[in-house]
Image (cartoon, rainbow, N blue to C red):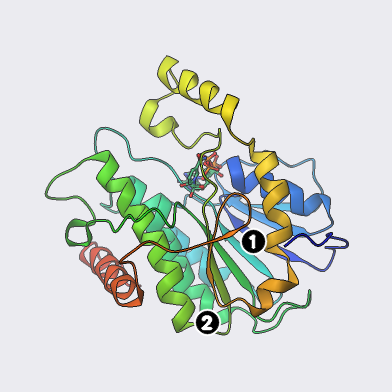
Amino acid sequence: MTEQITDLSKLNVLVFGGTGGLGRAISQNLASRGAQVTVIGQTFRDSDIKNINFIKTDLSSIKSSQNLAHELDVTNVDLVLFTTGILASKQKQETSEGLEKDMAVSYLNRLSILKILLPKLPKSTNHGFKGSRIFIMGFPGNNQLGSPKDLNQDETYHYWTTHMNTVAGNESLVTSLSKTYPQVKIFGLNPNLVKTNIRSNLFGDGYLGTAFESVLGWFTNTPEQYANVITPLLVSPELNDDDGGFYNHKGQKIPGSKGLDKEYADEFIDASVEVLKKKGIDV
Ligand SMILES: NC(=O)c1ccc[n+]([C@@H]2O[C@H](COP(=O)([O-])OP(=O)(O)OC[C@H]3O[C@@H](n4cnc5c(N)ncnc54)[C@H](OP(=O)(O)O)[C@@H]3O)[C@@H](O)[C@H]2O)c1
């Protein structure tokens, strides 16, 4: 995946979570090469870049996420990235819809949005892709299968179990939906550890969080370095002949988690749909 990127002026991109961290760095990188990028999040930080537009949405609300997905015109969309995320906090947090917050922000909104967008996305794109490309960022390939029996952590709560449910859920989205919607290409991205804002909901903005991120920054890529590596992969012609799967922080293909096959992924998605149904949300 080492081809030079030339002109991305025909490329239309949607980035859920493109207002901060890795999604923002990728959005800026694509925009600097001419792409038209729409970022979705809570706080717009790139109003000075003319080819980045902003849609303000609280993606912790599944109903707001679904409304947005219905409204979006995706006829000309080449790439859709999902980079929205938080880490679960030590005490369980619930959204106004009764969902555990990390599950809602980092996973369930993606499931809900994808169910609406996938049938609408083009089978071939102006930029020349065979099918729109979806990139789901998470932590795939780490053998995390989650706990599908108590996905909303109503019986017991631990922040790590909860976050690993979001990890398994995002990997399941790639494995399950790429077989169900073969007209589009669905990939999973594992960025490895990068210094961003992702851990603030767990550590808070105090000393511990700042110290952790500082130390992390000594050893790992910056978001901009990660974006520089991954952008060529996102637009690579080689992905036209790839039928989905997972890519690491170097843009190399990696295997999925052991035991997370299509059957397991389908069951995980079904269990997630049930969680939403219990809260009165149809997917
Ligand atoms: N960084 C890492 O070390 C690491 C490692 C493995 C996997 N990942 C995964 O990579 C992805 C990106 O993480 P990151 O490190 O870039 O995190 P980040 O810096 O915290 O960025 C998260 C993004 O999510 C958005 N967001 C959070 N809550 C939202 C809400 N309620 N409504 C709308 N948008 C919301 C933020 O937008 P606003 O600022 O506008 O709210 C921001 O754009 C996540 O899926 C994460 O799990 C990251």
Three-letter amino acid code at disc 1? Leu
Give the percent coordinates (x, y) of residue 55.
62, 53
Q: Is residue 21 visible?
A: yes
Q: Which residue is drawn at 85% across and 63% down?
A: 9
Q: Name the residue nearer the viewer: 43 or 106.
A: 106
In what quadrant of the picture does the N terminus appear?
bottom right
Mark 1 vs ligand 1: CB below 8 Å:
no
> Answer yes or no: do the residues labelled 1 and 2 have beta carbons within 8 Å?
no
Q: Which residue is drawn at 23% across and 69% down?
A: 274
Give the percent coordinates (x, y) of residue 134.
58, 67
* Residue wearing tag 2: 119
Does 259 appear above or below 209? below
Q: Is residue 62 visible?
A: no
Give the percent coordinates (x, y) of residue 131.
65, 80
Tag shown at residue 31:
none
Q: Dot 1: what SS? A: strand
Q: Residue at x 71, y 75 (%)?
A: 76
Check the image and name the residue furthest to the top. Answer: 207
Q: In this view, does 34 lie to the left or right of 165?
A: right
Does 126 appear above or below 277? below
Tag shown at residue 14:
1
Q: Dot 2: what SS? A: helix
Three-letter amino acid code at disc 2? Pro
Which picture quadrant has residue 66? bottom left
Q: How far apart are marks 1 and 2 (CA)?
A: 16 Å
